[in-house]
Image (cartoon, rainbow, N blue to C red):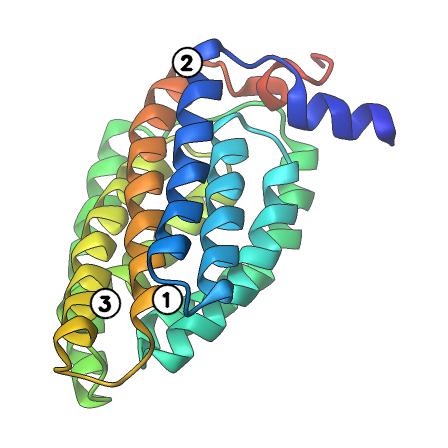
Amino acid sequence: MISWWHDQLFSNWKKFEIGYISLLLALQVGVYLLAPDSWIGMFSGIFGTLCLIYGMKGRKVSFIFGFFQCLAMTYVAWISHAYGSFAIDIFYVISQPIGWFLWEKSSLTKSLPKKQRQLLFGFALLAWGIGWWLLSLLHGQLPYFDSINFVVSFIAQILYICKFQENWSLWIIVNLANIIYWGILAYQLLVGATNIGTFGAALSQVALQAALLFNSLYATKVWASGEADYEGGTSKQN
């Protein structure tokens, strides 16, 4: 067990990866020091960053970090009235053990055929429009952005736990939308335009999504090159 943890956490890292990981984690702590009103937001940011970093490497330990991050993020979304985020975070919590099981059965990343990929992105666009309409009926915060977080994230997470490389393309869209979404909420809280949620929690999510955007861009390259196969080179080839 100790050997497994060591391999998962510390084996086979590039100097560039170590550098940018350190920077992304420092960003989460820095945001908390700037607005220390939500330690849960910082917890969510740190564990969310670790989850996707190890996911980029194709390692199952990402689901352990992801489970705790999703619990924290569910709370942040609830107090911020981000109902789309709240719903998808419940799904994230459930998907973590499922992802662990599926990654245990499959050592290789996969890619969809071109036609299926086009159908997938077309369906994601349609689903976003429907989600926007439904969230508008619930009077949620910024439903046009929250729908991306709710609907597109759902599709991306399914692709992720099934190890399809296309998941990262959808995560890039989600991360960009979330930076804008949480940035608007943080600004509204700062100027007193709303009292829903806390400034520190919203700002921590801006930092988290910026970190995850960079990681998603880099993960697209890593998964396409096969570097994430066999848990990033830490497990035996079948």
| Residue at 40% over, 35% down | 24
What residue sits right under mark 3 in the picture? 147
Q: Amino acid at mark 1?
A: Ala
Q: Quadrant of residue 145?
A: bottom left
Estimate the spatial distance between the alpha carbons at disc 2 and disc 1, rounded to whole Å: 29 Å
What residue sits right under mark 1 in the picture? 201
* Disc 1 secondary structure class: helix
- Residue 14 vs 54, above or below: the answer is above
Describe residue 59's horizontal placement relative to residue 213 as left or right: right
| Residue at 40% over, 54% down | 33
| Residue at 12% over, 82% down | 193
Residue 153 coordinates in the image, percent (x, y): 34, 55
Quarter of the figure that contains the N terminus: top right
Q: Amino acid at mark 3?
A: Ser
Judge the density around disc 2: few (<14), some (14-19), many (≥20) Cα neighbours within 10 Å.
few
| Residue at 56% over, 23% down | 108
Q: Amino acid at mark 2?
A: Phe
Estimate the spatial distance between the alpha carbons at disc 2 and disc 3, rounded to whole Å: 34 Å
Estimate the spatial distance between the alpha carbons at disc 3 and disc 1, rounded to whole Å: 20 Å
Which is more toward the observer, 29 or 134? 29
Mark carried by residue 16: 2
- Residue 100 vs 206, above or below: the answer is above
* Disc 3 secondary structure class: helix
Residue 125 appears in the rendering: yes
